Image: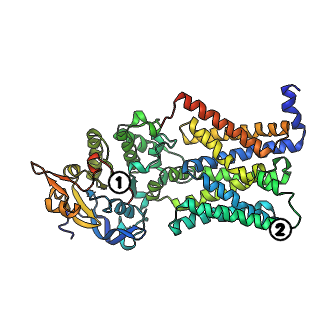
């Protein structure tokens, strides 16, 4: 098969085209939110919030409700819970995150194990199934990505100021705590819309890896986001083709491409001796 | 313990009444009463853990006092937040953050511009003037991590200037900078006070406090003294503030043995 045929032949399948569009949109959303997550050192929160979606998904499944809704509610409640408990308990946030992370995931596993004779969708919940995305799911995903981008655009300056210097921003009258909560909600939403593509276990890579790769390459926040988006989209496309060609799990293929790009950029920048600090 | 007030100045910029505040179970400042006039240039000095940063954070609305009340520009803290600029300690800033000098200074305009708004002509002029005043216009496109220590301080001074505030709250603005930069920063703060703006800075540099500020507040958990800047050289004031760990020098000066880091120009850190 020549390379042109390799690229074109899967495009004959509607499910592949839908998967490409969905993965690219997820790549953009994760890049935007991921840049804030990386700079605020919140990757662990991302991992916790994604695992916390699991009980929500299982409960929604048991009640016959939309799975994405159940995941969103559980993720947002957990994300805001991490913020509130950290402020009240006097414990370090990573302890709170570790407790909620495991507790919520255990709840999901327990509930799932109570469903009689049913294991079919477990793999999809945990590792994603972007090749199985429906037209209506894709439309819902597109709408959520659009809302996410509009919110970030409106509050761009405020989010940047509060992320860079929360003390200065707070003293100048910006509602830093509410901006923090908003960011947690945006992280939860990003994770939920990414679950179909990569699943609960790997979604943190979609958020963290392209943004971390971009931070090594550029020195402006705006460029970091656009570079991360480019990496996210390119990895999604390359990953899907790899998944198609070698019959691999799509989410894992996308994350492996992102990881390879990260290691490549790390190698190149350290060889160049740039950003030694 | 509060002694003579500074020379009569008419308008009150900041009024602190019976404020106690701290972290966890420990009070960092206790029953603090202070009145600061508009146009005053005040240095807050005292030992590590004496509550300098806590006092500044309470005035900035970044910490809620356990008790007492603070009025800023005639209203409770927070009401006039856009007229207050806060400069954090240098080590509280993530210098690897991907922003340029220009972008940091532009943050000073963010509360004025509001969501969705873009930087207008007046904002651009204020940003450029601020960069000019700290002599950083030629470095505007640098990433902040590429700057020297003195340049890093000047970026945040510029951000405060760009906000065109009525009150400046600066946490150790001259710590760890060379004498030339210190002179430049103090000239700017002095000029702002002369225009009627109120400046409060924490410092460990007693010579700077005595020479370049109008008033001083000695803070050791409680206010030891609030008065004219020369009080900083008063032996009794220093003993009360630092607990007597002083070594007199020939020529009337003193060396403090309170904090081994002090001579290296180190900072107060989180209390």
Q: Secondary structure at mark 2?
A: helix
Q: Decide: few, some or many residues near mark 2? Use Cα within 10 Å; few <14, some 14-19, many ≥20.
A: few
Q: Are marks 2 and 1 on the same chain?
A: no
Q: Position of residue A244 (x, y in %)?
A: 84, 39
In the displayed structure, A100 sits above or below B208; it is below
Q: Is residue B123 left or right of residue B133?
A: right
Outermost residue, top direction? A2
Q: Position of residue B179 (x, y in %)?
A: 26, 40
The disc label shown at residue A62, or none: 2
The disc label shown at residue B171, or none: 1
Q: Quadrant of residue A93?
A: bottom right
Q: How is the image coloured?
A: rainbow
Q: Position of residue A38 (x, y in %)?
A: 58, 48
Please identify, in this view, whether the residue under mark 2 or under mark 1 is nearer the observer: 2
Q: CA distance from mark 2 to mark 1?
A: 55 Å
Q: Write the residue at 72% across / 53% down.
A: A201
Q: Write the residue at 27% across / 54% down.
A: B259
Q: Chain of mark 1?
A: B
Identify which residue, B13 or B21, lies in the foreground: B21
Q: Write the residue at 89% across / 26% down.
A: A1
Q: Is residue B244 left or right of residue A244?
A: left
Outermost residue, left direction? B251
Residue B7 visible in the snapshot: no
Q: Chain of mark 2?
A: A
Q: Secondary structure at mark 1?
A: strand
């Amino acid at each position: 098969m020549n390379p042109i045929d390799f690229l074109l032949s899967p495009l004959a399948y509607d499910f592949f085209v839908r998967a490409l569009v969905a993965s690219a949109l997820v790549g953009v959303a994760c890049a935007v939110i991921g840049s804030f997550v990386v700079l605020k050192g919140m990757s662990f929160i991302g991992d916790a919030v994604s695992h916390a979606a699991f009980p929500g998904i299982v409960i929604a499944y048991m009640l016959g409700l939309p799975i994405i809704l159940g995941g969103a509610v559980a993720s947002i409640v957990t994300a805001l819970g991490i913020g509130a408990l950290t402020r009240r308990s006097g414990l370090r946030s990573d302890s709170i995150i570790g407790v909620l992370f495991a507790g919520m995931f255990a709840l999901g596993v327990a509930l799932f194990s109570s469903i009689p004779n049913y294991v079919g969708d477990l793999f999809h919940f945990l590792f994603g199934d972007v090749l199985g995305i429906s037209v209506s799911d894709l439309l819902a995903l597109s709408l959520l990505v659009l809302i996410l981008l509009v919110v970030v655009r409106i509050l761009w300056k405020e989010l940047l100021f509060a992320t860079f210097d929360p003390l200065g921003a707070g003293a100048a009258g910006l509602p830093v705590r509410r901006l923090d909560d908003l960011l947690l909600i945006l992280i939860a939403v990003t994770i939920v819309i990414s679950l179909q593509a990569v699943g609960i276990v790997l979604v943190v890579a979609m958020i963290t890896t392209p943004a971390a790769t971009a931070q090594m390459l550029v020195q402006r926040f705006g460029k970091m986001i656009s570079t991360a988006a480019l990496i996210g989209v390119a990895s999604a496309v390359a990953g899907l083709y790899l998944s198609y060609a070698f019959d691999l799990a799509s989410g894992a293929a996308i994350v492996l491409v992102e990881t390879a790009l990260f290691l490549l950029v790390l190698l190149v920048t350290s060889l160049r001796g740039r950003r030694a600090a | 313990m509060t002694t003579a007030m500074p020379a009569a100045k008419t308008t009150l910029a900041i009024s602190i009444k019976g404020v106690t505040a701290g972290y966890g179970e420990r009070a960092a400042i206790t029953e603090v009463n202070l009145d600061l006039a508009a146009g005053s240039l005040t240095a807050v000095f005292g030992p590590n853990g004496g509550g300098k940063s806590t006092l500044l954070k309470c005035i900035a609305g970044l910490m809620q006092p356990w008790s007492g009340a603070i009025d800023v520009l005639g209203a409770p803290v927070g009401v006039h937040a856009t007229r207050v600029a806060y400069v954090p300690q240098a080590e509280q800033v993530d210098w690897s953050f991907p922003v340029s000098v220009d972008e940091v200074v532009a943050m000073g305009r963010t509360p004025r511009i509001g969501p969705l708004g873009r930087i207008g002509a007046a904002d651009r002029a204020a940003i450029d003037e601020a960069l000019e005043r700290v002599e950083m216009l030629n470095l505007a496109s640098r990433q902040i991590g590429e700057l020297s220590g003195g340049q890093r301080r000047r970026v945040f001074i510029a951000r405060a200037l760009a906000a065109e505030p009525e009150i400046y709250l600066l946490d150790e603005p001259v710590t760890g900078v060379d004498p030339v930069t210190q002179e430049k920063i103090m000239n700017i703060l002095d000029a702002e006070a002369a225009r009627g703006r109120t400046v409060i800075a924490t410092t460990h540099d007693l010579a700077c406090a005595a020479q370049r500020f109008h008033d001083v507040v000695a803070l050791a958990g409680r206010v030891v003294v609030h008065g004219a800047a020369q009080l900083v050289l008063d032996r009794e004031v220093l003993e009360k503030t630092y607990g007597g760990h002083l070594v007199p020098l020939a020529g009337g000066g003193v060396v403090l043995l309170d904090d081994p880091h002090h001579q290296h120009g180190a900072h107060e850190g989180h209390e």
